[in-house]
Amino acid sequence: MWCNHQRKITGFVLTKKDGDSAANKERSEDDSSKSERKVPYLLDEAIHINRQPSKDYAKIARRAFYADSKQYNIHKLKQSVQSDNKDISIKAERFLNDIADCQDSVDTNELVEGFIVLSNLDKWKHRLLKKDYRFHVASQHVTAAKFSSEEMVDLLNACSIIQVRPNDPLMVALERQCTNSISNWDLNTQLVISDLWRVIGRSVHSMNDKLFQHVELHWNTLTKHQLVQLVYLIGENRSCSQTLMAKLENLLLKYVDDLTINEIAAVCLGFFKSQTRLTNSTVLHRFGDRVCEHLHDINPICLVSILKEYRYIHFIHRRMFDAIGQYIAPRLHTMPVLSMVHICHTFASLHLFNKPFLDAVAKCAIATVPKCRNKDIAKYLYAFGSLNYEPPNADEFFTAMIQQMHRLKPEYDRSPEQLVVSLLSLAYLNQYHYSLLNMVFSPTFRSMISERGRLDSNRNLFVLHSSVKIERPNYNAHKLAEEFIQQLPAEIYGSVEHEISSRAGVAEVLAVLKEVVGEKYFKCCFILPHIRSMDIEIHVDPDGNYIPLNKNPESKINKTAQLDNALLHQLISPTGKKTKLSIPGVAVQLNSELTQQMVGTKNDKTVKQSKRLAVVITSPKHYQHESKSLLGIHVMKRRQLNLLGYTVIEIAYYEWNEVTKKGVEECKVWLKQQIDSAIAR
């Protein structure tokens, strides 16, 4: 065998390796002529996909598509599902003893067969095996050998069953060999091996990059099963060229009606994890229709996989979401916490308000709160806060959430952004909890946020800080330091120029307002600097006269109102047709009065005696989907404007759109009525 003689053990003959033998030459032949593997492989445990959830439940469920067809390029190790028995134990022991005594190189086939035997041991023996010096000797022999593609598949599968550590030197060596050899393998073998590395848990980006480059040259020849498996693997790799993803999306259209619901889940998750947007509406509508058909039997994890891509691309298949809300609501208590959280988060992210569904979530969540992580709590609170909804059991629901946040305080050291999201979501609903605010504004916590360098976390922290100052002036614990606020990047704040040029209706209102009150009597600004939606500010004295706000009519900020009547009539015609308007650049102008009031330095009698109006122009994204109910942040904004003494004039997009159809003069009359009504309040 490995020494200078032969031994017959473990049911096969082991011989000293002969690099020139005919058998080895045959094993090293190009595998491109091998037929497609058609053995279903679910790593044993995936066969029991409907078992009770475990920590690996989600990972297994995402691989459920492999059970849908025997045509997937997957591998099932010989005897891998057999239970350990006395004969296997004897063979394993002999293999380990013999290889430990051997000083020569070993035939690759014998090495692979030996690892197959070891993989058939009971799992508790695998834990002992990995501490056995003889296994390490066997691993060293493996790292020194070169395997054919078929042997590599068997060897990797054995390692996955034994659960060799992903960063073990053995796996490092095998990855190197796979990366060097993958270009010589056929696509089926490439997919099998890439999948095995995923099961092992080791990221093999270099090898996968070569796989994806190969596929990009032959993408239009992929079978349905190759396409689905490839997209799944791309998702697990977390990245891929956008040109390849575009080609694969085109190919999806060819197979869209043949995909099972599990395959649809794998495809959606692959696109989501690779941060790729599905853009073909036909594919998205077909996928949504299939979900409606299979709601009664779809795995919750697979449903979440589908919804993640719809959330990412902000695509609303209304029939699908209505069906989900109706079907899932009474069954939420049977679902894993993770699934319930993600479905709830998807509805909120798409601004979809479904009262029965949210009520069911609030009811079920109370029982599962002890199992929730800090990110789960954040998603729950974001859903209710962003949709501005307090369920019937609000007191019990929010109390349970707050108590869990206190229990999870140590976790926030690892993910501080989750605490910021949770507290800001509560602020939308005018709920502030001082002990948690004291924690989030503490110097230690601010340092953790800064170290992570996430713009959205800094922005949310600033919004929370400013909101506390306005809505809870009696709060006197930790606050954000002025140095922290001064160092915030410009992206934290909104841009007047961007608001005017990008938000529908804003330029039109400015044009009409110039005719109604005069260009020097209003200004475009962010009255609340922490909320990035522009407003128009107007001041009126006690006698009802407009107070000039722009001392320099020719200033950059005032150019937004310099629109003559001819342009105004082009902008809003009697037929309701609108033309594009180019607005000169406008610099960001923060309201210094507000800033001074918030820090307690403003004491201007004229301002106190005057009436301050805030003209707030809305767009569809400020509301729940297909609704006239504002989202939580915009409800909070109006609450804060009122607290600061502003009278809010709502220019709702749906009202303004109707008025503009009647022509310019009607727009003037309508806007004047809104202003006069606000002055009279």
Image (tube, rainbow, N blue to C red):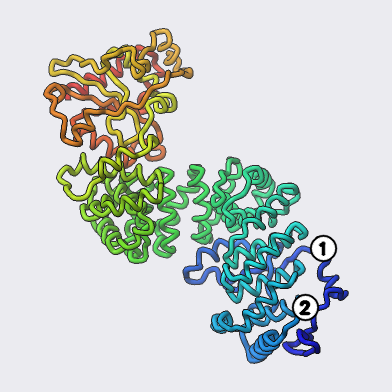
Which residue is drawn at the image coordinates 54% and 47% (left, top)? 275
Check disc 1: other Cα within 10 Å, few if <14, some if 14-19, many if 20+. Answer: few
How many numbered marks does the figure carry?
2
The amino acid type of the residue labelled 1 equals Asp
The amino acid type of the residue labelled 2 equals Asp
Location of mark 1 (residue) = 30
Q: Quadrant of the C terminus?
A: top left
At numbered mark 1, what does the secondary structure look like: helix, strand or loop?
A: loop
Q: Is residue 665 above or below residue 284?
A: above
Report which quarter residue 489 is drawn in.
top left
The residue lying toward the viewer, choosing from 150 and 319, is: 150
The answer to whether 431 appears left or right of 309 in the picture is left
Q: Position of residue 427 (x, y in %)?
A: 27, 46
Q: Position of residue 47 (x, y in %)?
A: 59, 71
Check disc 2: other Cα within 10 Å, few if <14, some if 14-19, many if 20+. Answer: many
The residue lying toward the viewer, choosing from 62 and 128, is: 128
Kindly identify which numbered label has been placed on residue 107: 2
At numbered mark 2, what does the secondary structure look like: helix, strand or loop?
A: loop
Q: Position of residue 158 (x, y in %)?
A: 65, 74
